Amino acid sequence: MTKQTVGVIGVGMMGHGIARNIQKKGWPLAYLDHPGNQPSDDLDADGARRFDDASALAAACDILILCVTGSPQIEALLLGPDSVTAALRPGTIVVDCSTGIPSATMKAAEAVKAVGCDFVDAAMTRTPKEAEEGRLNLLIGGDAATVAALTPLFEAFSENRFHAGGIGRGQTLKLLHNFVSLGSVTLIAEAAACAAENDIAPEVLVDCLRRGGGYGAGLDRTAPYILDGDVTPMRFSNSNARKDLTYYSQLVEETGTSRKVAEGVRGALDWLVETGHGDEMMPTACTTFRKKDK
């Protein structure tokens, strides 16, 4: 694949790592200047083009990567009155790395295809640390030939890639993953709070879980907070977690399968957000859940 110009909208905690690794691997890079971006002096220093207008950026690139908060932002970018869709050049590929509702993703894809372009959803898992290291997991939905053509670019910022099927299936797999992943962290946080209130030493709790059935990525990311108050391995806010569980609940409602466990997890996240802890990173719930009379 010729190294085409890649545009990025959403140079935040995850998007900055994506953009930086794309640039390091030799793709010409452009990005949208936005207040939500991480510092981008390093991108500028290595020749990235900074755009103030999303449509101008869309018109200037061959591949447009979207790494924004969720479905409302994707809909605004691709379906709203100020969408960038009309500015896309025929043949441009739009890659949505955000977390969204699959049915909304498919509507956005239809709008992109209507102007002679292609669309792939490539939702991410892992954390900003792995994003900076170029070691994300990508959960991909799209035409097999288009995904194959994009693979050299995906390899620039990901370690593992899972092609789940057609458009929207990457987002579906992401919601399934996040239900399990974020649900595990929420469960561990509640257990840690109960353990602390019952005088179980944090190191004993963590060691017990690590050597038994409680071990997994959720524990690895939560244990540093339980032991030392460190949230670095899990820089994911309670508000974002609630958003993802809300999306999962909508997916399950549309699918018709059970969501009783999801309702419990979402209820816990609702409480965290509604009591003023939405902007805190998820591991801090180990402390917050110690509050009585919830």
Image (spheres, rainbow, N blue to C red):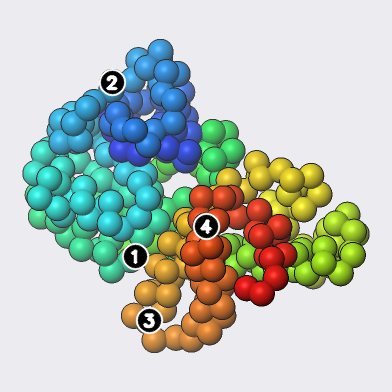
Give the residue at x 37% y 81%: 253
Q: Earlier in the sequence, mark 1 or mark 2?
A: 2
Give the residue at x 49% y 82%: 259
Give the numbered dot on residue 101. 1
The quadrant holding residue 166 is: bottom left
Looking at the image, is 87 positioned above or below residue 141? above
- Given the image, on which type of amino acid does mark 3 rest? Glu
Which residue does the numbered mark 4 point to in the structure image? 276
Q: Earlier in the sequence, mark 4 or mark 1?
A: 1
Whether tag 2 and tag 3 are in contact, CB under 8 A, the answer is no
Q: Residues within 10 Å of mark 4 (few under 14, many from 20)?
A: few
The quadrant holding residue 108 is: bottom left
Q: Looking at the image, is mark 4 or mark 2 nearer the viewer?
A: 4
Q: Position of residue 120 (x, y in %)?
A: 31, 52
The residue furthest front is 293
Q: Position of residue 292 (x, y in %)?
A: 70, 70
Question: Label 2 to label 3, Cα distance in Å?
Answer: 42 Å
Which residue does the numbered mark 2 point to in the structure image? 49
Give the residue at x 14% y 53%: 80
Give the numbered dot on residue 253. 3
Give the residue at x 77% y 53%: 226
For numbered disc 1, what is the local secondary structure?
loop
- Given the image, on which type of amino acid does mark 2 rest? Arg
